Amino acid sequence: MKAGDLPAGGGLSAVPAPGPDSRSLVAPVPGRLSALAELTKIRIAALSTLSAATGYVVSRRAADPGILTSCLGVLLLAMGACALNEFQDRELDRRMARTRHRPIPAGAMEPGTALAVALLLAAGGLGILWGLHGPGAALIGLLAAAWYNGVYTYLKRVWAFAVVPGALIGALPPVIGWTAAGGDPLDPRVLALAFFFFIWQVPHFWLLLFRHGSEYEAAGLPCLTGLFSRRQLAGLTFIWMLATPASSLLLPIYGLVRSPWIGMGLAACGAWLAWQAAGLLWGAARNEAFPPVFRSINLYALLVMALLFADTLV
């Protein structure tokens, strides 16, 4: 469940409705699997699952069999929420170049089928979390899905800064994992971890605006590129990128990192990200300057999670 998954496209031209021969019922199995992966935004769901696994491991200080069931629950719930989001955005997606290839607007799946898949996956994920890890983990998962599908999905259509409250969605999976492992969801340690993921998501999404902002505007969606110049947006994103490694310093302060070597690793990764972020200021006018920075912030999140996993082993 990721806050920055805002539909985008290159215009408002209508796409003809697909004929019956393109329906998923006659599609080959590989095509159906590809449509299902696209519908459920499997890569976004996998990242949410990985952050939940991080919360579980740092809570237990070990990886036991419970991590598999908790991750399965989060994965299914995240896939269901993403599929429901595509159902909700189907008409918007149909009008835009970047998203008209998605299963519903492309005719690879009927809206009713997509809705059924979304509800089934979400219910399965919640059932696993509730049945195997208690109501606490399930209710936090339900909150994340409700915030994504009930709040952020509609807020992004009316407010250019919607990603800031929407970042709560990505902050909750590690809390689910922590709670599934038996931890207190209000423990300051997991709140520090959630805060890190909250801060990280904002610049992660804003970096996409440098490539797709004009498409969002053409689609009639509020966008920061309509409020700020590219240089101003680069400066704003740069500040949030610096705040991301700064927030990671809370992890050793609150006791989530015990090894001094891991702490130094976090500091080194933070310094590297700050150096990468400087590229925003140097190349604010060049489109090619932003993909490397976007890759860097994604890699940085993976490195932080890897370091937290490693801290449980040393």
Image: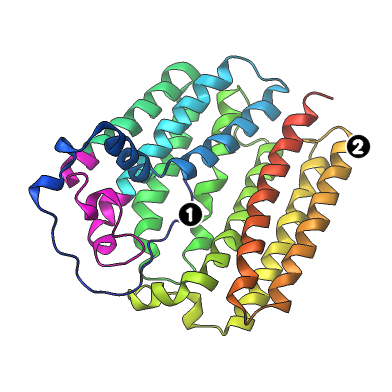
Q: Is residue 84 left or right of residue 310?
A: left
Q: Residue 39: x and y, percent?
A: 33, 44
Which sits in the foreground, 152 or 225? 225
Identify which amino acid the numbered label 2 is placed on: Pro
Q: CA distance from mark 2 to mark 1?
A: 33 Å
Which residue is farthest top? 65
Question: The disc labelled 1 sits on which kind of residue?
Answer: Ala
The reply to whether the magenta stretch includes residue 93 is yes
Q: Which secondary structure, mark 2?
A: helix
Choose top left, top right, bottom left or bottom right for residue 125: top left
Colour scheme of the picture? rainbow
Task: Report whether 7 appears left or right of 32.
Answer: right
Mark number for residue 260? 2
The extreme right residue here reads 260
For the residue labelled by badge 1, is the local secondary structure a helix, a strand or a loop?
loop
What segment carries the magenta color? 86-115
Report whether residue 307 is seen. Answer: yes
Residue at 80% x, 50% y is 269
Identify the residue under disc 1: 3
Q: Residues within 10 Å of mark 1 (few under 14, many from 20)?
A: many
Residue 49 in the image: state x and y as whole percent.
53, 35
Q: Quadrant of residue 56?
A: top right
Looking at the image, residue 260 sits to the left or right of residue 304; the answer is: right
Specify the quadrant that holds the C terminus.
top right
Please determine whether, in this image, residue 283 is positioned above or below residue 95.
Answer: below
Label 2: few (<14), some or many (≥20) within 10 Å?
Answer: few
Using the image, determine if residue 63 lies above or below residue 28: above
- From the viewer's perspective, is residue 168 above or below residue 120? below
Left or right, 158 with respect to 27, comes to: right
In front: 204, or 25?
A: 25
